[in-house]
Amino acid sequence: MKKFLNQLQFDAKRLFLRNPQYTFFAIAMPIGFYILFTKVMSFGTASEMTAFARSYMGSMIVYSVVIGALFSLAALMQHDRQVGLVQTLQLTPSGTTYYYASLITLMGLLNALSALAIMLVAVFVNQVTLSLTTGLGVLVIAVLGSIPLMILGVLYSRVQSVELLNVLSNLTSFPLAIISGLWWPLNLLPTWAQAIGKVTPTYLTNHLLTRFLAGQSLPAHDMMGIAGWAGGMIILLFVLATWQKKAKVVIQHGSKESQASVQ
């Protein structure tokens, strides 16, 4: 436990203190979108505006999770690989277990902070009424729903090029936000796009939040879907890691043979 706490303290300093832009980017952008859509680009009666602000709050919480996972987490872990931190930890007795556990814990905390910030904006700017119990429930759903996306962020971090990672993150986050109905209603999209959007982890999480905020029961189908995405991402991550490890061994073996032939 002491090793985990030490790793947690080390990662917290470099994630939150030495790189505050990660925290700012993950929290400020969804808040900006939330204020834009609820105060500038929405119209209706006072009650309609309040209802929209309450439901759209969940969408922006999910969007903040997407940003944190595909930009912050992926970039941080890619940097750790490029500077050799992950490779060094692999040579230690503890390996990378505490490293991954620490980063996932901290990103879960970041997601919770982002969700809390958006809820505070909803309460004080849009006069949305939230009880303490409801707020805690939203935090739990947001953190659990972020697990597949965080695993995807870990998967993307194995990309060698910084430029390619940026392209992948952008090509995933923005289309995902659109097709899963985070930016505008899903029924505005074509039927085929709606069918795809309804199976995405972002839609499933947002749907859970929408029903929870409305006081409705949580569908088991949505929770099973999120668990399925998490399991699938873990399998894909394992396959990619195994393939990269074998490819590295083959390259090293070929390099040694080339050197031997030259000699």
Image (spheres, grey):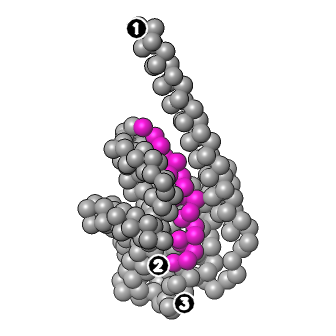
Asked if labels 1 and 3 touch by Cβ distance under 8 angstroms, the answer is no
Query: Which residue does the numbered mark 2 point to in the structure image?
Result: 53
Which of 142/46 is in front? 142
Residue 44, compared with residue 188, is above or below; it is below
Image quadrant of residue 99?
Answer: bottom left
Label 2 vs label 3: CA separation?
A: 19 Å
Query: Which residue does the numbered mark 3 point to in the structure image?
Result: 133
Residue at figure coordinates x 42%, y 44% from the top left: 87
| x and y percentages locating residue 84 in the rendered image | 37, 44
Horizontally, residue 236 falls left or right of residue 79, namely right
Question: Which badge, 2 or 1, comes first in the chain's sequence?
Answer: 2
Badge 2 amino acid? Ala
Badge 3 amino acid? Thr
Horizontally, residue 217 falls left or right of residue 141, namely right
Give yes or no for residue 225 being in the magenta stretch. no
Badge 1 amino acid? Gln
Neighbor class of circle 1 (other Cα within 10 Å; few <14, some 14-19, many 20+) is few
Which of 129/38 is in front? 129
Query: Which residue does the numbered mark 1 point to in the structure image?
Result: 263
Image quadrant of residue 166?
Answer: top left
Per the rendered image, the range of residues in magenta is 139-160
For mark 1, give the secondary structure: loop
